[in-house]
Amino acid sequence: MKICCKAPGKIIWFGEHFVVKGIPAVASSVDLYVRTYVEPCKDGKIRFWSKSLEKGFVYGEKEPDEELLPFKRILDLISERYGSLPNMKITIDSDIPISYGLGSSAASSISFAAAVLKYIGVEPMPELVKELSMEAEKIVHGKPSGIDTAISLHGSFIYYLGPHDIRPLNARWNEEYTLLVIGTGITRSTGLVVKKVLERYERFPNIMNKIYEAASEISATAKTLMINGEWDRVGELMNINHGLLVSIGVAIPETERIIHNSLRLGALGAKISGAGMGGIVIVLLRKKNRDTIINGVASLSNEIIEVKPGIPGLECSVKD
Ligand code: PMV
């Protein structure tokens, strides 16, 4: 028997950073996946291998490297709950770049937890997978908001009002449009960027309050426009939202060059997505302008990925 569970990554469309102070955010899945495969292990051990990190461990033998601790944590939790684990070979493979804010760690822990559960004969019910993934995410992020886990599990678009209020958003995606995820090549720590923004907030609370209020209005308006399928106007809102991200200090020349060039070449909207100070830019455009825009920004990024937003979340298959 061979199990394969795949879980998608995510992007934030609206509200990053502002969400830290309770403002709603809008996010969606994208068709970049982490896949976990589980099959019998001939030598009777529980072996784990990450193809993208090019490292692994044998469960129960020496302590794995720090990056692999979330996977060990999930195995510990599953064995505490369901008894000792059978031999298995677990392989994880990802097409989601790491440390870009594309939700690679949540997608990894979700696909991993679901695949191991399925292999031992436990149905990977959403609540159970979420709980295991959140435990693993705590090792990576300290205090995860739950947004990445929710999207990777359920897919689609969501309106995020806090860890306990994550609402599905019935966006009407239109295939005339497309979305690019453009990497700046600069990775950063979300925690440090969040801290910097909060310090600015403390220095100018009255001004920042107005910016946060505007962000709240943007997310609420975006939600309605997405439900109505008004993507040109969603693009315009992305530009307004990016202006606010510039104001709170998370833009850098590399993000701005990509954004300005994309807009100059006909993109409808372009903004930082996630923590900023590097990371990724997302660009909304009509498909007919795709080649012009991709060629126009090719010299600014080594990572230009066309993605489809709002695809389904976790999916598992079994081969006998
Ligand atoms: O880590 P990223 O890039 O997916 O985005 C973090 C989003 C923030 O709003 C900046 C932080 C948070 O915890 O919500």
Image (cartoon, rainbow, N blue to C red):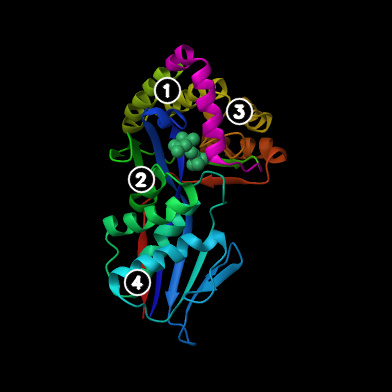
Q: Which mark is residue 215?
A: 1
Find numbered disc 1 in the image and state the secondary structure of the residue it sits on. helix
Q: CA distance from mark 1 to mark 4?
A: 44 Å
Which residue is located at x 35 percent, y 58 percent?
A: 132
Give the crowd class for mark 2: few <14, some 14-19, many >=20 residues within 10 Å: many
Which residue is located at x 68 percent, y 35 percent?
A: 296
Q: Image quadrant of residue 124?
A: bottom left
Give the crowd class for mark 1: few <14, some 14-19, many >=20 residues within 10 Å: many
Most distant residue in the right direction = 299
Say whether disc 1 or disc 2 marks the residue closer to the N-terminus: 2
User: Residue type at mark 2?
Assistant: Ser
Residue 43's x, y, as percent?
49, 87
**Left or right: residue 95 compared with residue 113:** right
Q: Can you say which quadrant of the picture contains the C terminus?
A: bottom left
Find numbered disc 3 in the image and state the secondary structure of the residue it sits on. loop
Residue 196's x, y, as percent?
56, 29
Taking the magenta stretch, the answer to whether it contains residue 195 is yes
Say whether disc 1 or disc 3 marks the residue closer to the N-terminus: 1
Which residue is located at x 67 percent, y 36 percent?
A: 297
Taking the magenta stretch, the answer to whether it contains residue 231 is no
Say whether disc 3 or disc 2 marks the residue closer to the N-terminus: 2
Most distant residue in the bottom direction = 43
